[in-house]
Image (cartoon, grey):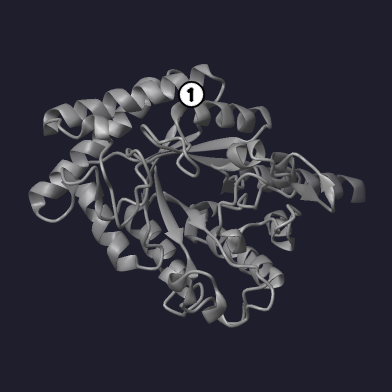
Amino acid sequence: MMYRLLAITLFLSSLATAAEPEFYKGADISLLQTIEDSGGVYKENGQAKDPLMVFKDNGCNAMRVRLFHTPTGKPPRVNSLDYTKKLGRRIKDAGLKLMLDIHYSDTWADPGKQNKPAAWENLSFEELVNAVREYTEEVIVEMCEAGAAPDWVQVGNEIAPGMLWPDGRIGTPQQWEKLATLLKAGIAGVHAGQGDRPIKTIIHLHCGGSPQQTARYFDYMKKHNVNYDIIGLSYYPWWHSRGLGFEPLQETLQASVERFGKDIMVVETAYPWYPNCDDPTKLLHKKERRPLVPGLPASKEGQKEYLEQLIKVTRETPGGRGIGLFYWAPEYIPAPRLNPGRGHLSLFDEDGNALPGMNAFQK
């Protein structure tokens, strides 16, 4: 009888485990190949190791890569379609999921700038809509044919202020309608290019600490029938926490899920690790001199604990709707022929050794 009860218990436990939604832990490693080509070497426990295997062996199951339309090719603006296909293929060959972040620009698109590709500068709005759809479809087809089929596609990067300015810049009701039209074109392009490989679409905002701004934006998406799959958010404590730690993000995650019934991901985050930097005013960038998470100094252990807590917060989103988290630019290390900077936010030290923060993905 005891063995029978034990068997039933194990069976029910296996069913419960199978029913749990998969949680994605990963990183945006868009500059990885360029750093390696410039002589950068990644290590774990002092031994050289394929960085993708460092991530995977520590619990990561996905990676994110950005795509520029026609970049200069000068680091860090290297993310052409050819570059992205090669890196994407490497990610897929490693058995990892792939998120493709299409910027619809020749360089970074973010809350401060959403500039059109130079090739689209003189297009009418109707021509621009067609260009977005056709370009997106071509990108997806080429990625899939290269063995780099994305599992998720971001239609734009941090597009709270709109995209493809001035056409898709938000403001008046007419401008919101134009933005919605451009997003629908991008989403249609993803679906047209995916073939029999279903790809989830993401709309990504930078305002992970503002439930109000997030709600306002996605209310407009609902009003204009923009049919996306996942809400993507950025959360950098020095910009978004207002000195309140994880509370603003928790509020945004909960409110967004309750209001829109969508899965949600933190698609960008980071935290500084530099030793002897308990005082945020010592950080390299002025904008990062704002408050970090209370009790978590800019240190190796502070970085690790930040990631552990952020993973926990995201996982605890109501209804299991918090489905993933991606760390931004963990691969930034100095190489003999390139120093990309921002190494204080990396998950590797200046010698290429994996930091304790890497272990946080095991949680």
The quadrant where residue 136 appears: top left
Circle 1 crowding by C-alpha within 10 Å: few under 14, some 14–19, many from 20: many
Classify residue 346 as left or right of residue 189: right
Classify residue 262 as left or right of residue 281: left
Q: In the image, residue 363 lies at what x, y percent?
A: 70, 58
Q: Check the image and report above or below for 43 versus 100.
A: below
Specify whether residue 240 is in view. Answer: no
Q: In the image, residue 289 lies at what x, y percent?
A: 48, 77
Q: How many marks?
A: 1
Kindly give the residue lying farthest to the right in the view shown.
2
The quadrant where residue 53 appears: top right
Going by the numbered disc 1, the residue's amino acid type is: Met
Q: Check the image and report above or below for 297 versus 48.
A: below
The quadrant where residue 358 appears: bottom right
Residue at which label 1 appears = 143
Specify whether residue 316 is in view. Answer: yes
Q: Name the residue rendered at 49%, 44% in the picture.
A: 76
Q: Name the residue rendered at 15%, 27% in the picture.
A: 127
Q: Secondary structure at mark 1?
A: helix
Q: Check the image and report above or below for 14 versus 96.
A: below
Q: In the image, residue 196 lies at what x, y percent?
A: 46, 18
Q: In the image, residue 128 lies at what x, y percent?
A: 19, 31
Q: Check the image and report above or below for 333 versus 180.
A: below
Between residue 141 and residue 5, name the one nearer to us: 141
Between residue 337 and residue 255, name the one nearer to us: 337
Between residue 29 and residue 37, name the one nearer to us: 37
